[in-house]
Image (tube, helix red, strand yellow):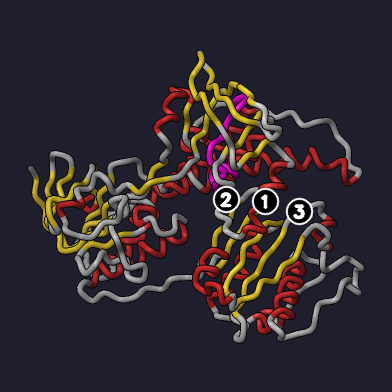
Amino acid sequence: MKELNTDVVVIGAGTAGLSAYRNAKQHTSNVLMIEAGPYGTTCARVGCMPSKLLIAAAEAAHAIDVAPAFGVHSSKPTINGVEVMARVRNERDRFAGFVVEAVDELPADDKIVGYAKFLDTNRVQIDDHTIITAKRFVIATGSRPAYPGVFNNFGDRLIINDDVFDWQDLPESVAVFGPGVIGLEIGQALHRLGVKVKLFGVGGAIGPITDPVIKDYANTVFAEEFFVDTDSNVSDMKQVGDKAQLTYVDKNGNKQTEQFDYVLAATGRVPNTDKLGLENTGIKLDERGVPIADKHTMQCGDSNIFIAGDASNMIPLLHEASDQGSIAGQNAGRFPDVRIGLRRAPIAAVFSDPQIAMVGETYKQITARYGECGCFEVGEVSFENQGRSRVMLKNKGHMRLYAEQGTGLFLGAEFIGPQAEHIAHLLAWAVQNKMTVPQMLDMPFYHPVIEEGLRTALRDLNAKLKFGPDIINQCMECGREIRS
């Protein structure tokens, strides 16, 4: 058994792990990184980038489908599934290749291949070949898809989102379970690419939305395009020949039995912390076996162990993983000088159509914090008659903004609508800079742009906060309805 000594060990070479490694290196040259799987981040290999490639193809097909509404006519698009998936795989490999190249440039002696397991708070064993003694550790082992055991009844017809991006061709039909970010994005994209899709969920949840008004709107607008039942009743799940078969209750209360080429389980992810031997470290774990850490320092208790990225089970987003990795790496590198790191305003987006975005505190968090006193106001706007949105036939959406009474401090937003990914950034900057609603209204808005819908919601919020007058009903420049 080979034995090594070092200052810092980073377990995992994904987004968080690479960030932690680079930042720890600023304080000590003695940093080792352990990785068992293929190099290349979840985002590049099986997450945000390949899914956006599939969505881009779907958007191109959908643009042709809706062109007649503009008076532009052409024949119905022919979707070549082989070519669609070839581009997805090729570009996916290109993105992942950039990450692999970056890892290849790291010193070979700093990289160790294998699975790590803690022997105690200062030692890890890598498979059956190496024991490393280190002063500090960063856990950045990521996460993996998870689904109920009953889904195994589908046999080899059961897939996870990782499998989709290795398809050689598009299937004829897919049942998607889980209307969260992954299920909604992939489900709608496959539908627009000509695949028969049915999307099932439980409890009415859709995407990450917590605001009941936005949740109801999203459920309605997506169900208008393809089969979406976020509070479904599904039974008799099994494999029949080379098909997946299930029975569900349709919107009319009737039982329907259908077969699909695949069942995509997009029912959530779990942190990869269960095989790390964390019970040997003495650090506190939650009920799922995930280390309890300070979100500002990423330190597990007062120990020499830090955690970052999806493994922390805090906010499973790439930019959050990178930030957490930076904080964990810096603190591991200069331990015991542990410092609070920069935590940016929360921001999340779903690249569906219409898009979904959430910024700052969620409706659920705000109502829990303010309780029954209701010391906050909600401003809102519909995008259905918003000028630029209607021009582009992208006029589906609803926005809700939240602000504190008295101070007018902008707290957050949940919304669905066109270009939500871009508007979310404006709002995230406002949250991070602790702007008030009147200050936000002092910012420039061009005309005609979708962002004018945001201004309408801000004006509505400003009036409810008693900082300004009620908003007018119609825009004097273009005549569009403002309150709709």
Q: CA distance from mark 2 to mark 1?
A: 9 Å
Q: Which residues are magenta?
A: 171-184
In which quadrant is the C terminus drawn? bottom right
Which of marks 1 and 3 precedes in the sequence?
A: 1
Residue of label 1: 218
Residue at the spot x=87%, y=72% of the render? 473
Q: Mark 1 and mark 2 in contact (Cβ < 8 Å)?
A: yes
Nearer mark to the viewer, of 3 and 1: 1
**Element class at badge 1:** helix
User: Residue 433, position in %: x, y?
Assistant: 55, 79
User: Residue 62, position in %: x, y?
Assistant: 74, 40
Q: Would you identify the image quadrant in which residue 184 lies?
A: top right
Q: Is residue 94 or residue 426 the one in the foreground? A: 426
Q: Is residue 315 above or below residue 255?
A: below
* Residue type, mark 1 in image: Ala
Mark 3, Cα crowd under 10 Å, few <14 / some 14-19 / many 20+, is many
* Residue type, mark 2 in image: Gly
Q: Is residue 173 or residue 231 the one in the foreground? A: 231
Which of marks 1 and 2 precedes in the sequence?
A: 2
User: Residue 216, position in %: x, y?
Assistant: 67, 52
User: Residue 46, position in %: x, y?
Assistant: 47, 42
Residue at the spot x=13%, y=41% of the render? 129
- Residue 370 is left or right of residue 77, and the answer is left
Q: Which mark is residue 207?
A: 2
Residue at the spot x=67%, y=39% of the render? 58
- Residue 35 is left or right of residue 482, and the answer is left
* Residue type, mark 3 in image: Lys
Task: Report if residue 60 lies within the magenta region.
Answer: no
Residue of label 3: 396
